[in-house]
Amino acid sequence: MFPSFRFPAALLALATIAPLHAAAADPAPGPVYAGASYGFRANSGLDCLPGQADCDKSSKRNGKAYLGYSFDVLPFQGGVALPSVELVGYTGGEVKSGFDTGAGKVAGRGKFSGLGVQGVLGYQFDAFTLSGRAGVAYTQGKVDYLGGGSAKKNKAGLIYGIGTAYALNQNWSLHLDWDRVPVKYNSKQTTKVDMFSLGASYRF
């Protein structure tokens, strides 16, 4: 994983150079786009054990990447509606918390990863876009117990979220998103992770 300051610095550099790139870019981008976001916070919804000294239920090193296809725009209320479909992958950083087990709540360190497909509907006005998305994902959660042993479980479930984007030019955009992702760490512990992320996308 990379230090948390590097990704925002990269976005600032992108905001500086993207307008210069626009002059060399094709005048009409196609329907395919790709993007990636750094999850600066992911709330796990877990509960710590009483007196657990190293408890940290929110991971600060997460991420998602996606590949999308946009359909024809639909004029709406002075802007345009932008329907699209995306293939998205998630990775969740480490959380330190208590995890429900058959023997009660046990302290451990958990992570997750996943892959999903979702529909996205955006509303664009000027350079800004507001969007909502929903779909299904298949995730794998893993927990390493502090007292020894580990567990791993897979889960299929609904994903959804909202976001806003700002177009630097017709190819590059910056994004601020919230996503809710279902995760199962073991046979007894299921939760929904709320990921907040900042990223960029490029339309080809």
Image (cartoon, rainbow, N blue to C red):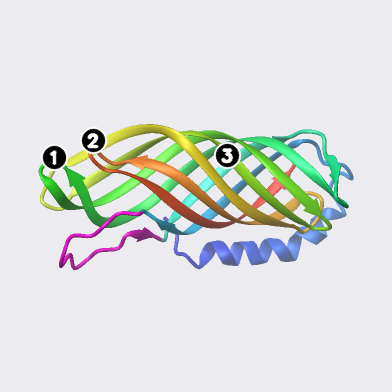
Q: Secondary structure at mark 2?
A: loop
Residue stretch rendered in magenta on the structure: 45-59
In the image, is residue 184 above or below residue 50? above
Label 3 sits on residue: 134
Q: Secondary structure at mark 1?
A: loop
Asked whether, in this view, residue 190 is left or right of residue 36, the answer is left
Q: Is residue 48 magenta?
A: yes
Label 2 sits on residue: 187
Task: Please state the horizontal and vertical placement of residue 31, each as a whole percent of the image.
Answer: 77, 35
- Find the distance from the CA under tag 1 to the CA under tag 3: 33 Å
Amino acid type at image mark 1: Gly
* Contact, mark 2 vs mark 1 (Cβ under 8 Å): yes
Q: Secondary structure at mark 3?
A: strand
Asked whether, in this view, residue 155 is left or right of residue 76, the answer is left
Residue at screen point 65% across, 67% down: 12
Mark linked to residue 136? none
In the image, is residue 36 above or below residue 137? below
Q: Nearer the viewer, residue 20 or 83?
A: 83
